[in-house]
Amino acid sequence: MLSFTEENYIKAIYKLSEDGDGAVTTNAIAEVMQTKAASVSDMLRRLNEKEIINYVKYRGVTLTNSGQKTALQLVRKHRLWEVFLVDKLKFNWDEVHEVAEELEHITSDLLIRRLDEFLGYPKYDPHGDPIPTEDGFMAVKQQVLLSELAPGESGLVMGVKDSQPLFLQYLDKVGIYLGAKLKVTDKMEYDNSLEISIDHKKQLSVSAEVSKNIFVSR
Ligand SMILES: [Zn+2]
């Protein structure tokens, strides 16, 4: 059995190792967990004893196979709960992350299997992120950032890099949603902002920052 805190560390290490390459440093974990490096070291020692991580002094940590499995199951539960909240309980996509952070710690495998079945085995969460299967398989999407498209190119919105409520609310406001067709009609050299069209209709100007947080199909 793992505590909530241990599970949150495992998720943090998983995310950091996905974003970077290889070993994750104590400082990076401390920053994500908003705690002191000393507390992180204590936790890492514990996770090392439980064979969740490989702990290499002065270099950082990597997840063991069992740690990787645990992380993927947490991600699976988190994303399935997000689908449930949006599809069945009518939450908006900017309201579900925090609730799912709590629900993901429920350990019943049967509950999750039934939830998956009840939802019709969804492949993606409401933010477009793939949901790992029960045996830890996760689809890899063919996607690029909107900022990487050249004028004239288009793609369907596949997901968001930033799933903070404020960003999702911004997307709601301007009418960008998962599956929308975005076409870059012009790019401003000055600040890298983009002129885009949504579904061949609405014209919109988006900042470079916004374009770096939307994934589109390739
Ligand atoms: Zn989430």
Image: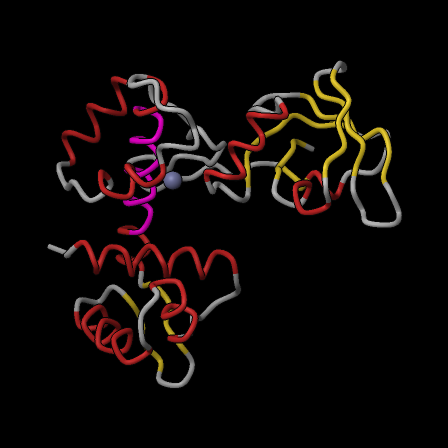
Task: Point out the residue furthest to the bottom here.
Answer: 58
158 to the left or right of 6: right
Q: How is the image coloured?
A: secondary structure
80 to the left or right of 102: right
Q: Is residue 40 above or below residue 189?
A: below
Point 47% across, 33% down: residue: 127
Point 87% across, 50% down: residue: 190
Point 72% across, 42% down: residue: 207
Q: Residue 51: image x %, image y %?
A: 22, 67
Tally of numbered tags: 0
Q: Residue 56: image x %, image y %?
A: 35, 80
Q: Is residue 45 above or below residue 160?
A: below
What predominant SS class does the magenta segment belong to?
A: helix
Q: Quadrant of residue 59?
A: bottom left
**Is residue 79 inside the magenta stretch?**
yes
Q: Nearer the viewer, residue 148 or 33?
A: 33
Q: Quadrant of ligand 1?
A: top left
Q: Residue 19: image x %, image y %?
A: 51, 57
**Is residue 164 inside the magenta stretch?**
no
Region rendered in magenta: 71-84
138 to the left or right of 216: left
Q: Quadrant of residue 160?
A: top right
Can you say which quadrant of the picture contains the C terminus? Answer: top right
Point 21% across, 31% down: residue: 112
Q: Residue 11: image x %, image y %?
A: 33, 54
